[in-house]
Amino acid sequence: MGVALFRVGGARRADCTAGAGGGTYAPQGAGRSWWEYGGAQGAASDGRERRGKLGWKFYDADDYHPEENRVKMAKGIPLTDQDRSPWLCNLHDILLRDIASGQHVVLACSALKKMHRDILIRGKDTAPPKFRESKEEKLAKVQLLVVHLSGSFEVISGRLHQRKGHFMPPELLQSQFDTLEPPTAPENFIQISVDKKLSEIITIVLETLKMK
Ligand SMILES: Nc1ncnc2c1ncn2[C@@H]1O[C@H](COP(=O)(O)OP(=O)(O)O)[C@@H](O)[C@H]1O
Ligand SMILES: O=C(O)[C@H](O)[C@@H](O)[C@H](O)[C@H](O)COP(=O)(O)O
């Protein structure tokens, strides 16, 4: 539930280094920028399509869950922030590693809470923001776009019931709605209805990027 585009040049946080979660991750790829969104709203579909239009590398955060998270979700048990932390940290590490090679990246990710999006951007840092933001990271934040794909429970639930071969059962959707913290200022975001066609969503994002 949400999408983000980042242009990040900041340094990786010491407490969020690769392997923090010890899970079965499959890091790959390169990028300077990414966007992130998710939560059964069409994020992966939209991301793949936009990756094609932009020529950016695409990551689906679902591909990076540790096995224990997949098993838990498949049983219909919602993840806790403790479960999500190593997964988000790993994504943060992957993306920052990619930044070094200078390629733009698209990331589809649920990122339901502000703190989840913060981990993707900065890593897991408990220091107060005024102490943890380097000049570089401030610049990076200016260039971050979060795209929040919003929709009604009914529409998204209907789509999930049609979706085949995914570990997350539709029954978990209510917990996602309960957990969602829609992006608000000062996050740099746009909101797009999932009622729109995929092609329309992509057009809006591309237009927004041109203006940034
Ligand atoms: N804009 C859209 N219009 C109609 N169906 C969509 C749209 N976006 C996604 N879907 C469908 O909704 C389902 C969930 O999309 P998916 O990309 O898996 O979501 P997420 O990655 O956010 O969990 C898929 O079956 C997908 O084909
Ligand atoms: O495609 C989906 O249905 C979702 O992306 C789903 O897989 C889930 O949202 C996340 O992978 C992690 O779970 P949280 O939403 O609990 O963070």
Image (spheres, grey):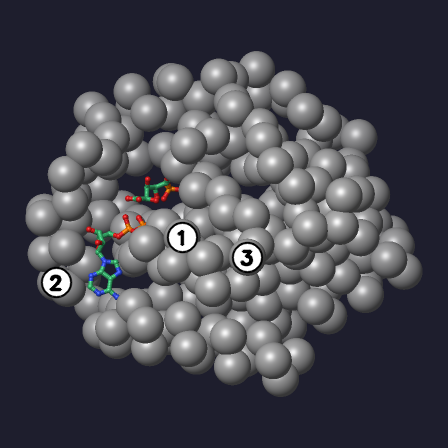
For residue 48, the mark is: 1
Q: Where, quadrant-wise, is the C terminus in this rendering?
A: bottom right
Q: Quadrant of ligand 1?
A: bottom left
Do residues under tags 3 and 2 come within 8 Å of each other at their CB atoms?
no
Q: Is residue 112 left or right of residue 129?
A: left
Disc ID at residue 154: 2
Residue type at the position of mark 1: Arg
Task: Using residue 20 as the reference point, say whether residue 142 is left or right of it.
Answer: right
Which amino acid type corresponds to the residue marked 3 in the rendered image?
Gly
Type of amino acid at the residue the image marks with label 2 = Glu
Give the Cα distance between marks 1 and 3. 10 Å
Q: Is residue 80 left or right of residue 117?
A: left
Q: Residue 91 at x, y = what percent?
A: 58, 37
Mark 2 Cβ inside 8 Å of ligand 1: no
The local secondary structure at tag 1 comes to helix
Q: Is residue 18 above or below residue 115?
A: above
Inspect this view and state whether residue 99 appears. Answer: yes
Q: Residue at x 9, y 47 (%)?
A: 161
Looking at the rendered structure, the secondary structure element under dot 2 is helix
Mark 3 near ligand 1 (CB under 8 Å)?
no
Question: In percent of the image, x 73 and y 37: which residue is there?
Answer: 97
Q: Quadrant of residue 37?
A: bottom left
Q: Looking at the image, is mark 1 or mark 3 nearer the viewer?
A: 3
Where's residue 127, x and y in %?
A: 78, 44
Crowd band around label 1 with a 10 angstrom C-alpha radius: few (<14), some (14–19), many (20+): some
Q: Quadrant of the N terminus?
A: bottom left
Q: Is mark 1 within 8 Å of ligand 1?
A: yes
Residue 64 in percent (x, y) is at 47, 30
Q: Badge 3 is on which residue? A: 55
